[in-house]
Image (cartoon, rainbow, N blue to C red):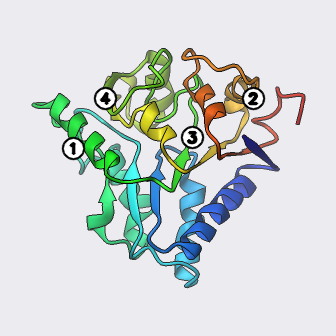
């Protein structure tokens, strides 16, 4: 696991964005695994700017998103489908047929998971972008999730719902379930780039960099991956004494 220490969120976003942009320029038909939430927005802004500057093109890029809420429509501003279009896809030349975002049809949840898992089995993600939750979740793989888990429906913990309520009018509006790429599928990516910044990620980074691997902290499995880059900042590393 390689750790890149940056001054702040802006620098971390630039560094992570440069890693992905360079990979796209070297391999125009790259397959990217994408994340949502506030952490990757700066990265997406960097990629949009590189596209506008004619440094990269997304016309042959394929993308697979980590997760999506269950029970809200794709036209809902809080959906991750909406998020990805607003923060990336609507601003670049990507072929929307190459975009894959999981969707859990409430009438056939199991079939929805099987379908997305099969899509992932038929491709290899070159770079998987991740954030990290306060409880160590990656995607929506909450504590105690098996490291062998594939795409499934997860019951979101109250901690995760509380962390995400800032995107909704109230905690009552935050969905209780989500469909998520499983840990096994995340680990199948050739390279993983994790971004974690700010004081609210300090405890998570302390646990991640302790090196202990446990399902109590799902992100800890990343120590078993051969190519992980953690891009972080001073505040997120404030409880880590070895860097």
Q: Residue furthest left?
A: 107
> Which residue is the site of mark 1?
73
Q: Which mark is residue 152?
A: 4
> Which residue is the site of mark 2?
209
Helix, strand or loop at label 4? It is: strand
124, 116: nearer the viewer = 124
In screen coordinates, is 76 left or right of 130? left
In screen coordinates, is 14 left or right of 32? right
Say if mark 3 contacts mark 1, CB within 8 Å: no
Q: Is residue 142 among the parts visible in the rendering?
A: yes
- Which badge, 4 or 3, is on the more N-terminal residue? 3
- Which badge, 2 or 4, is on the more N-terminal residue? 4
Give the class, few, some or many, for how many residues have Cα within 10 Å of label 2's Cα (few <14, many ≥20).
Answer: some
Residue at 50% over, 47% down: 189
CA gap between label 3 and label 1 equals 23 Å
Residue 236 position in % (x across, y down): 75, 35
Q: Is residue 77 among the parts visible in the rendering?
A: no
């Amino acid at each position: 696991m390689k750790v890149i220490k940056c001054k702040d969120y802006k620098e971390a976003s630039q560094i992570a964005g440069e890693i992905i942009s360079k990979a796209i320029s070297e391999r125009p038909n790259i397959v990217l695994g994408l994340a949502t939430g506030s952490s990757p927005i700066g990265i997406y802004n960097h990629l949009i700017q590189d596209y506008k500057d004619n440094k990269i093109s997304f016309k042959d890029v394929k993308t697979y998103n980590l997760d999506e809420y269950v029970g809200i429509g794709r036209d809902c501003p809080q959906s991750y489908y909406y998020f990805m279009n607003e923060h990336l896809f609507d601003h670049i030349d990507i072929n929307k047929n190459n975009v894959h975002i999981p969707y859990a049809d409430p009438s056939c949840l199991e079939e929805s998971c099987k379908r997305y898992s099969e899509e992932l089995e038929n491709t290899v993600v070159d770079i998987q972008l991740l954030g990290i939750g306060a409880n160590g979740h990656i995607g929506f793989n909450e504590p105690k999730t098996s490291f062998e888990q594939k795409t499934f429906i997860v019951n979101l913990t109250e901690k995760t719902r509380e962390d995400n309520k800032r995107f909704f009018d109230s905690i009552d509006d935050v969905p209780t379930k989500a469909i998520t790429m499983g840990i096994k599928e995340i680990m199948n990516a050739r390279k993983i780039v994790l971004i974690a910044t700010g004081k609210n990620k300090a405890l998570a980074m302390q646990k991640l960099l302790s090196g202990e691997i446990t399902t109590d902290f799902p992100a800890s499995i990343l120590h078993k991956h051969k190519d992980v880059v953690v891009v972080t900042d001073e505040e997120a590393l404030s409880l880590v004494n070895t860097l």
